Image (cartoon, rainbow, N blue to C red):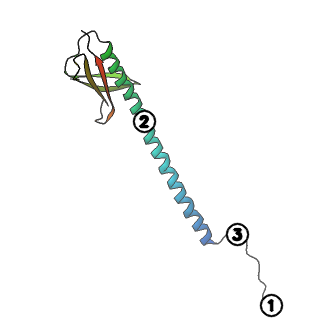
Amino acid sequence: MILRTKQTGFSLMEVLIALAVLAIAMAALVESAGSFTSNQAYIENKTFAHWVALNQMAEQRIADSRLVVGGQEGQEEMAGRIWRWKNQISATPDPDVMKVEVSVKQENDETVYALLTGYVEVNN
């Protein structure tokens, strides 16, 4: 008489399939975490650049000097970083209003993180 014993545990094939599924899931999690970190840094840069642009627009609005058509460039420190800004001032059909476009980049980066357009009343 042949006695059959009941097997317990997993076969080698079941273990290999489980490990493959786990490896695929872990790879997706690592990629997702990396993408989140990259997006978070980009959004942080956009936020600080927007604040720099708002500061420049406010300075144009409160400036005592008369706005002149043309461009201005400069830099400002915010959040421990240097931000390069460029103001482009142009005329509008209304002689009492000037259009101001402010673009902001990080010091060693050519990506424009903020572009703000506003209209400023000309001081007469």
Residue at 43% from the left image edge and 33% from the top image edge? 44
Residue positioned 33% across, 21% down in the render: 57
Q: Amino acid at mark 1?
A: Met
Q: Secondary structure at mark 1?
A: loop
Do we see residue 84 in this rendering? yes
Mark 1: give few (<14), some (14-19) or many (20+) Cα within 10 Å. few
Pointers 3 and 2 in contact (C-beta within 8 Å)? no
> Can you say which quadrant of the picture contains the C terminus?
top left
- In the picture, the quarter occupied by the N terminus is bottom right
| Place of residue 89 in the rendered image (x, y in percent of width and height, measured from the top left) | 23, 23
Q: Which mark is residue 1?
A: 1
- Label 2 packing within 10 angstroms: few (<14), some (14-19), many (20+): few
16 up-or-down from 112: above or below: below
As shown in the figure, which amino acid type bears the numbered disc 3? Gly
Name the amino acid, label 2: Ile
**Residue 9, numbered circle:** 3
Q: CA distance from mark 3 to mark 2?
A: 50 Å
| Residue 24, position as x, y percentages in the image | 52, 59
Q: Nearer the viewer, mark 3 or mark 2?
A: 2
Residue nearer the viewer, 69 or 72: 69
Image-based side of 93 in relation to 109, left or right:
left
In the image as oriented, which residue stretches furthest toward the front? 94
* Disc 1 to disc 3: CB gap under 8 Å: no
Q: Which residue is mark 2?
A: 43
Quarter of the image for residue 84 reads top left
